[in-house]
Image (tube, grey):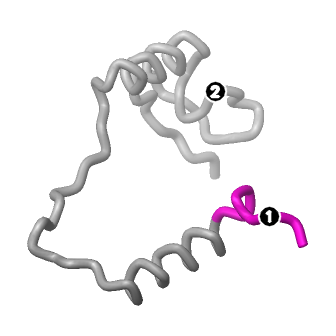
């Protein structure tokens, strides 16, 4: 059974399969329109900032370790 999804831009039905080159978009045009909206900050992923939380050195070290673990691009070769 092939999954059918709605194009996020124009709502046209898109088959979710390898031959659907621009999935989840129906076309390159819809894909570029969406990209332009992100670039123009029309779409945002935001989260409320918790100002009351003070970060300790241990918390910062743990965050740095997790970041480096998940982002090998930033790790210097051994």
Q: Quadrant of the C terminus?
A: bottom right
The mark closer to the camera, 1 or 2, is: 1
> 63 or 44, which lies in front?
63
Q: Relative to residue 49, is residue 30 drawn left or right?
A: right
Identify the residue at image location x=52%, y=15%: 32
Q: Relative to residue 73, is residue 3 drawn left or right?
A: left
- Dot 2 alpha-carbon crowd within 10 angstroms: few under 14, some 14 to 19, many 20 or more: some
Helix, strand or loop for the magenta stretch, by majority: loop
Tag 1's secondary structure? loop
Q: Is residue 48 magenta?
A: no
Q: Are marks 1 and 2 in contact (CB under 8 Å)?
A: no
> 48 or 6, which lies in front?
48
Residue lying furthest front: 57
Q: Considering only vertical position in the picture, is 10 above or below 65?
A: above
Q: What residue sits right under mark 2 in the picture? A: 22
Residue lying furthest bottom: 58
Q: What residue sits right under mark 1 in the picture? A: 76
Query: Residue 74 location, x and y as percent?
Result: 70, 59
In this rendering, does residue 74 appear at all?
Answer: yes
Identify the residue at image location x=55%, y=22%: 26
Query: Residue 2 location, x and y as percent?
Result: 63, 46
Q: Considering only vertical position in the picture, is 40 above or below 56?
A: above
The boundaries of the magenta stretch are: 71-78
Q: Considering only vertical position in the picture, is 33 above or below 20?
A: above
Query: Residue 41 location, x and y as percent?
Result: 31, 26
Residue lying furthest left: 52
């Amino acid at each position: 059974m092939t999954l059918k999804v709605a194009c996020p831009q124009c709502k046209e039905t898109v088959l979710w399969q390898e031959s659907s080159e621009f999935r989840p978009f129906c076309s390159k045009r819809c894909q570029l329109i969406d990209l332009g909206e992100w670039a123009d900050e029309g779409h945002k992923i935001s989260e409320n900032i918790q100002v009351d939380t003070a970060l300790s050195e241990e918390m910062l070290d743990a965050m740095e370790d997790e970041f480096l673990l998940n982002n090998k691009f930033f790790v210097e070769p051994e």
